[in-house]
Image (cartoon, rainbow, N blue to C red):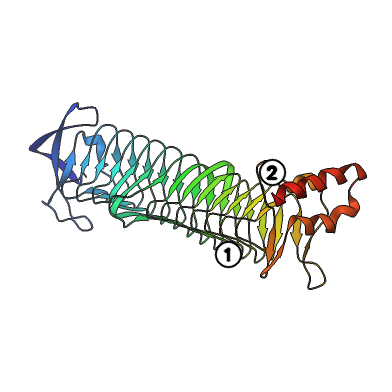
């Protein structure tokens, strides 16, 4: 038995390519959840746009056209549009001014509302929640939002964008202007918000209770895990930030690691596979190559490393600050010079002269 029929009520609209589309209003032939027999529904172009099986329905002024399909127990309402080859199925709900297009799929218990565009091959599934209370959200390309993840926007004139080929899952939250692109996994209870830019390459992972906010940039193959926090204008590129580590202000961590309770702040730079463990880098600190770590005694010091790695062209000072105590380049040289070949002594002395200029 059919659950709806097409009425004589018709309207004409233009699609995204300005092609004229003739739409027909539907009316219920039987009682359905939240729909009474004889109640008018939304608009479709063809009978194939809304399945005659299940409790699926198109409410209000919602529109479904092209090769798009609404099936199972899915519901489309308010001013939502489903078009192209998009599919809304399962118990999914799409409402507000949402647009589902391309080959996008909204399924299972997913909820989509507000000024949201989901396009290309993007998937929103499970009990995920995607809602733009204000501003807008775009989910496109091969992006997947699943497993109770939340993508939301509540800031006027701001767009939260998720693209590339990645997964936002579990209970992760992405919101309020964040831009996610490339290859990535954001999961656990991770929070990514505000004007953050994540540009994953070879898989960027943000998980557990990690927080990334402000105008921070996460680039390349990164792991932001544990209770790590990245905020301000910080830049993290091809790096590991884990445990309770913090990168903030204008600090940069590139090809390095922060572990334990380490902090990189102000204009500090951690580069060239350097690792900080339970340490602080701040002001204009530049840490390259050496491993700064907690040792058995309470005193902390850099481990041995080729002195050439302590200097970058144009740098006038390289130093590490831990617990209010500053170790300058001369101190570092004294600590590690015993392991250096004799022919590097001249280079060391010359470097110190340059630093004093």
Disc assigned to residue 205: none
**Image quadrant for the N terminus?**
top left
Residue found 33% across the figure and 38% down from its top: 86
**In the image as oriented, which residue stretches furthest toward the bottom?**
298
Disc assigned to residue 312: 2
Residue 151 at x, y percent in the picture: 39, 54
Determine the secondary structure under disc 1: loop
Q: Is residue 314 left or right of residue 31?
A: right
Q: Circle 1 sits on which residue?
A: 227
For discs 1 and 2, the disc positioned in front in the rendered view: 2
Residue 197 at x, y percent in the picture: 47, 47
Residue 214 at x, y percent in the picture: 45, 56
Q: CA distance from mark 1 to mark 2?
A: 32 Å
* Closer-to-camera residue (131/60): 131
Q: Is residue 164 above or below residue 114?
A: above
Residue neighbourhood size for the residue with mark 2, other residues' Cα within 10 Å, grouped as few (<14), some (14–19), many (≥20)? few
Image quadrant of residue 7? Answer: top left
* Closer-to-camera residue (351/150): 351
Determine the secondary structure under disc 2: loop
Residue found 57% across the figure and 60% down from its top: 265
**In the image as oriented, which residue stretches furthest toward the front?**
357
């Amino acid at each position: 038995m059919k659950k709806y029929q097409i009425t004589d009520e018709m309207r004409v609209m233009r699609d995204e390519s300005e092609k004229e589309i003739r739409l027909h209003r539907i009316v219920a032939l039987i009682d359905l959840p939240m729909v009474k027999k004889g109640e008018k529904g939304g608009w479709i172009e063809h009978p194939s746009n809304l399945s005659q099986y299940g409790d699926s329905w198109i409410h209000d002024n919602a529109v479904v056209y092209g090769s798009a399909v609404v099936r199972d127990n899915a519901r489309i309402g308010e001013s939502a549009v489903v078009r192209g080859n998009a599919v809304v199925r399962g118990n999914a709900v799409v409402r507000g001014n949402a647009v589902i297009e391309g080959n996008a799929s909204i399924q299972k218990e997913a909820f989509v509302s507000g000024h949201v565009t989901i396009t290309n091959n993007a998937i929103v599934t499970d009990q995920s929640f995607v809602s733009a209370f204000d501003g807008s959200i775009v989910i496109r390309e091969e992006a997947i939002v699943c497993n109770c993840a939340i993508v939301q926007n509540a800031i006027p004139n701001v767009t939260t964008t998720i693209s590339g080929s990645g997964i936002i899952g579990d209970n992760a939250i992405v919101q309020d202007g964040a831009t996610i692109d490339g290859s990535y996994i954001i999961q656990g209870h991770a929070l990514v918000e505000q004007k953050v830019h994540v540009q994953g390459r070879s898989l960027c992972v943000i998980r557990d209770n990690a927080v990334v906010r402000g105008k921070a940039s996460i680039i390349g193959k990164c792991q932001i895990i544990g209770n790590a926090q990245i905020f301000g204008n910080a830049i993290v590129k091809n790096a590991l930030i884990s445990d309770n580590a913090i990168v903030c202000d204008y600090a940069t961590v590139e090809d390095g690691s922060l572990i334990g309770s380490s902090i990189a702040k102000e204009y500090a730079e951690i580069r060239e596979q350097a690792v900080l463990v339970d340490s602080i880098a701040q002001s204009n600190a530049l840490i390259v190559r050496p491993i700064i770590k907690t040792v058995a005694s309470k005193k902390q010091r850099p481990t041995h490393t080729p002195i050439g790695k302590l200097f970058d062209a144009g740098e006038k000072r390289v130093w590490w600050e831990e617990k209010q105590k500053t170790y300058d380049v001369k101190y570092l040289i004294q600590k590690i010079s015993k392991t250096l070949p004799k022919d590097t002594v001249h280079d060391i002395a010359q470097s110190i002269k340059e630093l004093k200029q």
